[in-house]
Amino acid sequence: MTTRDTMYTEDIAVSNRKESYSLLDETVARLPPEVDRSGNVEYKTKLEAVTESRTTHLATQLQWRLAEGNGHAVYMIGVRDDGYLVGITESELDATLSVIRSMALQLANVAIVSTNKRVLVHRGNRIVAEVHIDQHSNVPRTEVRMAVLGDLGVGKSTVLGCLTYGEADDGHGKARLNLLRHRHEVESGRTSSIALGVIGFNADGEVLNYANNRSAEQIYQRSHHVVTLIDTCGYAKHLKTTARAIAGHSPHAFCVTIAADRESVTQTTREYLRIAAVLRMPLMIVLTKMDIAAKATFAALMHDILATLDVTVPDRGRCIVTSTAESKQLAKDMMGLVVVPIFTTSAVRTLDFNELTAIMSKTLQSSDYARPGIASPSFEFHVEHTYSIDEVGIVVTGWVNRGSISISANTDRKQLCIGPDCTGKFVDIEINSIHTLRIPTEIAETGTSAALAIKTLKPVSIEKGMVILDADHLNKFGKKQVSGEFTARIAILSQEFRSMQSVIVHIRSAYRLAHVLEIADDVEGTSHSQQQSGSDRDYAVVRLGFDDNACDYLSSGMPIVARDGQSLVFAGHVADIL
């Protein structure tokens, strides 16, 4: 199982047609034989004069195909089981579609979404058809995205491997192999790309991972609550990737990992703790490698961790978690910025993760907590990846930052637009389908990850970092938010920043070169950040301008992270748009 199987992005292509055969292709006279025991594609010559018991049997078969396709099934009509295109008449097709509708009525939230026909001229104008059927989920699911941060070699990927696969490590990094995406990562042991792991929890709080599920889709289908773990890079060479995870993947919480065999907290870890403080991010500490920790050095390390937390997040309590009791209250306090739980773990003894998963199972969506910049009735979707998929078109994946969107026939659809492009303009779009956590649905709400199949009404080059907005909101207020110059209230992580003329700023999933136009001390002594650290010199208000007259969509309270080469220089929030 590769990391790609655990990503948010939906493989909407038909699962057992990877050879790019298409019934609609005029040059194709025969498809590969039907696969009976797997896949979401079913061949049917025709269905007519079907009895009630036969319809029930066919509905069961449809449900299985839908499960194989994660809520999406494709019926090839006018096709024999051996793949030969025989075709049927128009009246026979109408009768077949009527039977399929009857099958769908016996299942929950199932409907035909499209029917594409092809006329077989060489067979007397007989017809074959490709029928797409979706099942929308009505099970409420909550989701939390957690960025796993830490210095080089502390065991971030190993911890994720143990959590997502339910397997103990062998002490040499075996557990992390399931998450690593590139050969050089396996050889060096250093993560260079963002990897996503998923843990689900059912209604009883039972952990659902690859130990008891065969795919990410099955985990999502069975889960009532999902935690997505964002594995980041500890090596300074790949700092750009870590900065993109913090700013672009919109995590709801930080999990900072520290190796228990070290004697003190590193400078990199201190920076992550300061970023958590300035971004008002819920925080947990996970101590790894407890099996090789020495008693004397571990005592010194714990003292340093508590002292560091006193400086970086003095308004939050800290709690060393030793049992699963009160996990619900502890999770609520953590997400409410009241406490920082500390866990001691060993990857070679996976039982040590029980307390950690108990807390994760109780964490709530970010929309249930007061977070800067998300209290708005308008729709705002942040684009993380873009894809072009045969028979579907353009698909964008990302996160709903504000509001909600519905494609239900019972609701008025909002006019939406995507942008900005290099000139600052937006283009109108239509949303054809929605997947949340790889499950077809009719609505996507604040705080959830989603894949949207869209249709642009004008040609446009869609890029990561763009946003999808409610067009009415954009016309009234949004154009004031498209700018190339802004101010931000920041926590300075490197004092060298005060002498820099430009930095690379990460905003959502995009990053741009920005010139430092002005730096002023944050003299408002009432800022929450200053009260937290008690170190006025580390906080400032900075005015930035994008290079080459570039512009972007900005909003007050939007988190930003800046770097210079292989070091983070500041983190904070957008204050004013100029």
Image (spheres, helix red, strand yellow):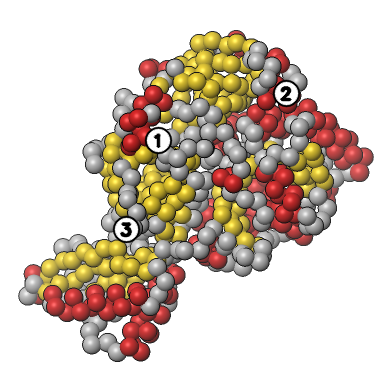
Q: Is residue 198 visible?
A: no
Residue type (three-letter) at the residue carrying disc 2: Gln
Label 2 crowd bin: few (<14), some (14–19), many (20+), radius 10 Å = some
Q: Which residue position is annotated with label 1? A: 466
Tell me which numbered mark, 3 or 2, is placed earlier along the sequence: 3
Quick one: SS at disc 1? Answer: loop
Q: Earlier in the sequence, mark 1 or mark 3?
A: 3
Q: Secondary structure at mark 2?
A: helix
Query: Which mark identifies residue 374?
Result: none
Q: Looking at the rendered structure, which numbered label has been put on residue 409?
A: 3
Q: How busy is the neighbourhood of tag 3: few (under 14 within 10 Å), some, or many (20 plus)?
A: few
Q: Which residue is located at x 49 percent, y 55 percent?
A: 437
The image position of residue 449, as x and y in percent, is 49, 48
Tell me which corner region of the image, top left, top right, bottom left or bottom right, holds residue 409: bottom left
357 sits left or right of 434 in the view:
right
Mark 2 — residue?
Answer: 531
